[in-house]
Amino acid sequence: MNKTILFILLISFSRCFWGMGQSNVSVTNNIRMIENFNFEGWPNCIKLSNGKIELIVTTDVGPRIIYFGFINGLNFFYVSSADKGKTGGDKWHLFGGHRFWLAPEIMPRTYAADNTNVKYTWNGKVLKLSQDIEPQTNTVKEIEITMYPNTNEVEVLHRIINQGKSDVELAPWAITACAPGGLALIPQEPYIDPADYLLPIRPLVLWAYTKMNDPRYVWGEKFIVAKQDPTISSETKIGVLNKQKWAAYYINDCLFLKIFEYEPNSVYPDFGCNNEIYINGDFIEVETLGPLSIIHPNESVEHLEKWILVQKKLKLNDEDALELAIKQMLKFVSNWIFK
């Protein structure tokens, strides 16, 4: 065969081979969006990055945000080794990452499988993920993700749409399964002298499988600390009404801050909780909840979180220093959350 012809054939074959499954890349306003990105066995993930942080969402299942972290850094989110890459079927899988549930927790409604393809749109600023109608509730779950172009911030908007013919009473429930080995922080409400205030300040809720003397909890003056310990396999969960509107997860000298709304005139599920922590031997979940709402047909409710990543070594044994450090971080947060 003529060497020139052979060379042309080889080049053509190479282009065809490398084009198969090739990711689609677009860049808008410093946000790089990659489609058809293979992550942990799911071939059609989407990656967003701004040169500082990156996140990955699944579209083969979900909606799930399966990765969040600094560029080429630690994944702050837990990924289930038993479930990664799985699709299809009617059995609910843990998968890991950030998921969107409906509260209160009721079997089988809460555990509706999210194993099918997710529809998505990208307008250069907002990535919108839409799930098919859940037959148990006749609702549709949507997540809208907005990554800031020049900071370590992401807004995650959760929406429940009632597509049924009757009212449903639900609360949006945003659950983030975090990587093992770190600790969650919940701020205590500010101390008030009993001469100035006599009523209770907020509920602290315990689940039936929670023990107050569990060594994974530290009940501090200014913070509740909840540690993920891989050597302790038992499950535990607590909930609070968090009026300070933030919670955090700390691991490897990095802090993942979740900021969320508190509506004082609303009723929250689980004896009045808008912030919950669940722990087992594999991961820890930092959860936020919106108010209970009666959703009429063709109407919706929303729940917004802001995520921030900060690289900083914190003095965990000094509550005053820890409080000051987090207050300094929160100064840079947009004013929308502190109405």
Image (spheres, rainbow, N blue to C red):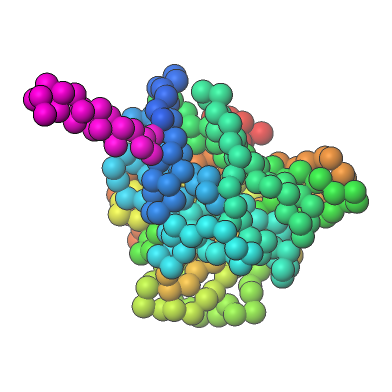
Q: Residue furthest front?
A: 1
Q: Residue furthest left?
A: 3
Q: Considering the image in quadrants, where does the N terminus appear?
A: top left
Which quarter of the picture shows residue 136?
bottom right
Can you say whether 192 is above or below 158 in the image? below
Question: Would residue 3 be counted in the magenta stretch?
Answer: yes
Q: How many marks?
A: 0
**What residue is rendered at 44% in x and 35% in y?**
35
Q: Is residue 244 left or right of residue 333?
A: right
User: Is residue 106 in view?
Assistant: yes
* Residue segment shown in magenta: 1-23
**What residue is rendered at 71% in x and 59% in y?**
103
Residue in the foreground of this view, choosing between 182 and 214:
182
Residue in the foreground of this view, choosing between 105 and 253:
105
Which quarter of the picture shows residue 118?
top right
Q: Position of residue 46 (x, y in %)?
A: 46, 39
User: Is residue 177 in view?
Assistant: no
Q: Considering the image in quadrants, where does the C terminus appear?
A: top right
Q: Residue furthest right?
A: 166
Q: Position of residue 16 (x, y in %)?
A: 31, 32
Residue in the foreground of this view, choosing between 154 and 1:
1
Q: Is residue 8 left or right of residue 187?
A: left
Q: Which secondary structure type mostly characterizes the magenta part of the structure? A: helix
Q: Position of residue 246 (x, y in %)?
A: 55, 47
Q: Position of residue 13 (x, y in %)?
A: 25, 32
Which quarter of the picture shows residue 32?
top left
Can you say whether 5 is above or below 313 in the image? above
Question: Would residue 327 be counted in the magenta stretch?
Answer: no
**What residue is rendered at 44% in x and 60% in y?**
84
